[in-house]
Amino acid sequence: MTIFLLILASYLIGALPFGLFIGKLAGVDVRKEGSGNIGATNVNRLLGKRLGTLTLVCDVLKSYLPMLAANFIVHGQPKAELWVAVCGLAAVVGHIFPIYLQFKGGKGVATALGMFLFLSPMAVGLALLCFLMTVWCSGFVSAGSLAAATVMPIMLWLGGESVVKIIACLPVVALIWLKHHENIRRLLRGEEKSWRGAKKS
């Protein structure tokens, strides 16, 4: 019962639409402006770096903190590592499919980052390098996000992390790719918006 409640709580915390809350406080409904996404990228685009960064931090913490709490509660119990990872996954699912917004949420990158940070900060550091290199070379944040998510299981494996951690991150990577399907189409058509301020083919 405790495990079930931890997973449920992780989902409900992950489902909190901080980008929407912050946008509302600033007088903007981020679902109706820009890309229509509730994540940090759209908030940054609409409301500036300060509120965009605040959204990013909140979205990262809403997976990291539930995992931290779960780790404290189930520490020493059988399959503790698995249940902590599942709590992280539940938070990511909550962000992408929030019950509060009729299951229409963000793309999950920042919340996945919180989960990955808990699993392995070193692997995240290497994946971040991949993100920066991809964005710098391509000009597209979406391409960087997809690249970083894709290499994350590889980085965990190279870092000698457990099979549990590697398997737990696979559905997160799949969800990130699924939620970026429109970005992928725009990238293939040469219509994706570049961070440099102009469309790039």
Image: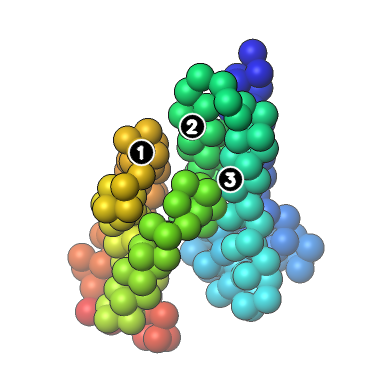
Indicate the position of residue 13 as horizontal and vertical percent values.
Answer: 66, 40
Front residue of 26/148: it is: 148
Q: CA distance from mark 1 to mark 2?
A: 9 Å
Is 144 on the left-hand or right-hand side of 57? left
At horizontal 54% and vertical 52% (from top left) the residue drawn is: 114
In primary-sequence order, the first of circles 3 and 2 is: 3
At horizontal 26% and vertical 67% (from top left) the residue drawn is: 187
Comparing labels 3 and 2, the label whose residue is closer to the camera: 2
Comparing labels 3 and 1, the label whose residue is closer to the camera: 1
In primary-sequence order, the first of circles 3 and 1 is: 3
Indicate the position of residue 191 as horizontal and vertical percent values.
Answer: 29, 72
Residue farthest front in this picture: 76
Residue 63: mark in rendering: 3
Residue bearing mark 1: 162
Q: CA distance from mark 3 to mark 1?
A: 20 Å
For label 2, count other residues whose C-alpha is less than 10 Å away and answer few (under 14), some (14-19) or many (20+): some
* Amino acid on which disc 3 is placed: Ser
Is 169 on the left-hand or right-hand side of 93? left
Q: Secondary structure at mark 3?
A: helix
